[in-house]
Image (spheres, helix red, strand yellow):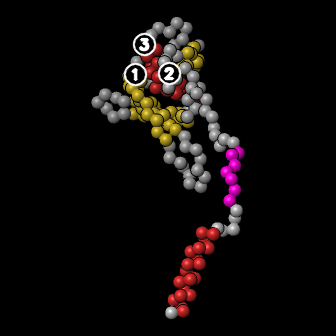
Amino acid sequence: MNVIRALTITALLACLIPAGGCGITPTDVQDRGDAPTTKIPPPSKTFFLIKDGELAKEPANVDDDTVTSLLGALFAVSSQPLENRDTALRGFTYLRSKNSVDPPQRDEIQLPRTSTLTVYISGEGTLSQLGKAQIVCTAQQDAAFEMVRIVRENKNRPSTSEGRFTCGELK
């Protein structure tokens, strides 16, 4: 009986010791400022046209500065007269875009995930480097997109990829 009583008292004391604390005195929460974050500037209401054979940033007549609005305006202006500017997107139509997050490549260090924008277009003929640059550079004004993938959807044929690009490699 004494052994059972001793074990019971030991078990009760073992339960009460953690409730008493671990020996570290609690402190108040200290506010040390905002967490470090990256501030991405908002995209501008501009798109890229061609002037004297090179890309030129031009103001876009859009209600908001979303990439979808800017790309829609870029393709819409290709059917209008442009005075001293031009576009390499005549004959092409903007269908939609899809934002997808790339999976991390390594698990040693978790780097911030970057986003690839996939732009779907339709049209016949060859999409020139300047045409690709117009699409990619317009989309990458939104700093959230590291890469832009262009996919051409064809009637009665499978879709074809025009490639993945950054503005810097097409300029």
> Which residue appears at 55% of the width and 43% of the height?
113
Residue 93's tag is 1
Of the image marks 3 and 1, the number of the one nearer the N terminus? 3
Cα separation, mark 3 vs mark 1, equals 10 Å
| Residue 168 magenta | no
Q: Which residue is mark 2?
A: 64
Q: CA distance from mark 2 to mark 3?
A: 21 Å
Task: Tell me where residue 2 appears, x and y as whole percent.
Answer: 54, 92
Query: Dot 2: what SS?
Result: loop
Can you name the residue that lies furthest to the top here? 83
- The earlier-in-sequence mark between 1 and 2 is 2
- Circles 1 and 2, Cβ within 8 Å, touching? The answer is no
Tag 1 secondary structure: strand
Q: Position of residue 101 (x, y in %)?
A: 49, 41
Residue located beneath label 3 in the image: 79
Q: Residues within 10 Å of mark 1 (few under 14, many from 20)?
A: some
- Please identify, in this view, whether the residue under mark 2 or under mark 3 is nearer the observer: 2
The first of marks 2 and 3 along the sequence is 2
Which residue is drawn at the image coordinates 44% and 10% (left, top)?
A: 80
Secondary structure found at label 3 = loop
